[in-house]
Amino acid sequence: MQTAIQKIGDTHLLITPDGKPLPHKDSGSPVLHILPELFNPYREIGLSHITLVTATLAPHDSTSPVSVSVLPKDVVIRQPYPSASYCVAGTSARKMGWEVPIDLDAPPRWLDLKWEVQLPSDSGQETLAIHHRFVLEFNLTQQGRVFSMDQTSTFYDQNARSISFIKREDATPEFTKGDESFIAYRQSHIHGLSFHQTLNLNSCAWSDLICTGIEDLVLERDIEPATQFTTYKEAHHNNACCEILAADLYNAIRLAREVIVPEEATYFNDSEQHPAIKFICQWWNDLAPDPATRIAAQIQIDVRIADDNLYWSGMSEKTPWPIDGEWRAKSRNACARWDEYVLIEFAQSKTANFYNAHSFQVFNVVGQDFWSGDGVPCEEAKTWDFAREGLEALRSFPERFPVAWEKLKAAL
């Protein structure tokens, strides 16, 4: 089940796909929901290199460093969000943290977390220790009895996000949100980092939290890939007007991985000019059955993983969508497929599309919506590199879709 957030007045609700709020769910007594998160955008550092070593609470009357461990015995580190850059500690039965009971007459003073990260061999340092102290303030409301660190995940919450970092410079304003209590500093004597912040937590219900929807969220990396498909084959075929040869798709992926564009390059922010994008769009512009659609300048990729009714997008943070959706028929003449695995949608250049003062629309080659957005100034939207998502989908194809990649190579 996919969920979304909807604001009604001053209340933010989790909304199910059919537009209904999630059923109200609260705790029977006050609890602190501990949600340790580590931001790790570095591909060379995998989950096996990350450990949450300690989690301790300082008692209300503590005047010394005596603290109580609240680290579960079965703590597990996962990547539960669509973005794999966010590592979250939970338990064997629960992705998103854990809870501990609290006495609001004598609440804990602070929470201390310690992470250890095994660094790459060329970093000059074996292990990075990361200490994070959260000074806790509790505000009981009529909304519920849950005090959750997940409260900080929303842009409208005034607390800095309760996330630890592997590099101090990663703690950008996107995370700190102007919270003056957030402090980051190096600990030279242990070659580590320390973070300190105050969390002003308002109580809520479990059903108010984003993490409630994440618990049941299924991601592509959680799925056991199918080696052959027996269902929705006809629907997949009907979503495309032609088929691309394995060699042509392979060469587009190869170019995306071999031609690395340095950030200072003049066309770095215009991936329509990248050789991989130009190659695959030229294939379409030479061979598309309808000559009127031979105006491609960018692409998007959808891939089947399991033997079910879902495509998984080449866009890393986009949710899957049904293979047999009726809207697919409108874009059939903008799509090519490869075998039973891949659907490629071709789109017009960003320069050939619609922009006004505060919205934009980028169209595929048959005039259907490809990208759109509201509340974005026209001049800003015109600078966006829409084609970069398609380029990244090609570049990361072997890692994200290994079964399809092996099938593609075998078909050459």
Image (tube, grey):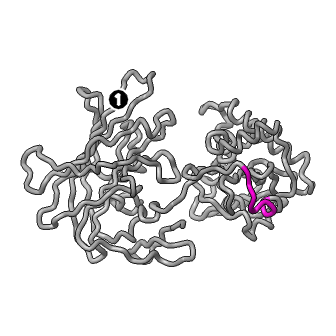
Q: Is residue 19 left or right of residue 160?
A: right
What range is drawn magenta here? Answer: 228-236
Quarter that holds the C terminus: top right
In the depicted structure, whether residue 286 falls above or below residue 27: above
**Residue 61: x percent and y percent?**
7, 55
**Residue 108: x percent and y percent?**
16, 57
Residue under the point 33% across and 71% down: 205
Residue under the point 80% across and 49% down: 339
Q: Foreground: 15 or 278?
A: 15
Amino acid type, mark 1: Thr
In the depicted structure, whether residue 189 falls above or below residue 115: above
- Is residue 72 something that shows in the picture? yes
- Is residue 367 something that shows in the picture? no
Q: Foreground: 41 or 410?
A: 410
Within the magenta stretch, is there residue 282? no
Residue under the point 39% across and 66% down: 209
Quarter that holds the N terminus: bottom right
**Residue 80: x percent and y percent?**
47, 53
Q: How many marks?
A: 1
In the depicted structure, whether residue 102 falls above or below residue 36: below
Q: Foreground: 380 or 199?
A: 199
- What residue did someone put label 1 on? 127
**Dot 1: element:** strand
Residue 238 picture quarter: bottom right
**Residue 248: x percent and y percent?**
82, 39
Label 1 CA crowd tier, 10 Å (few <14, some 14–19, many 20+): some
Within the magenta stretch, is there residue 232? yes
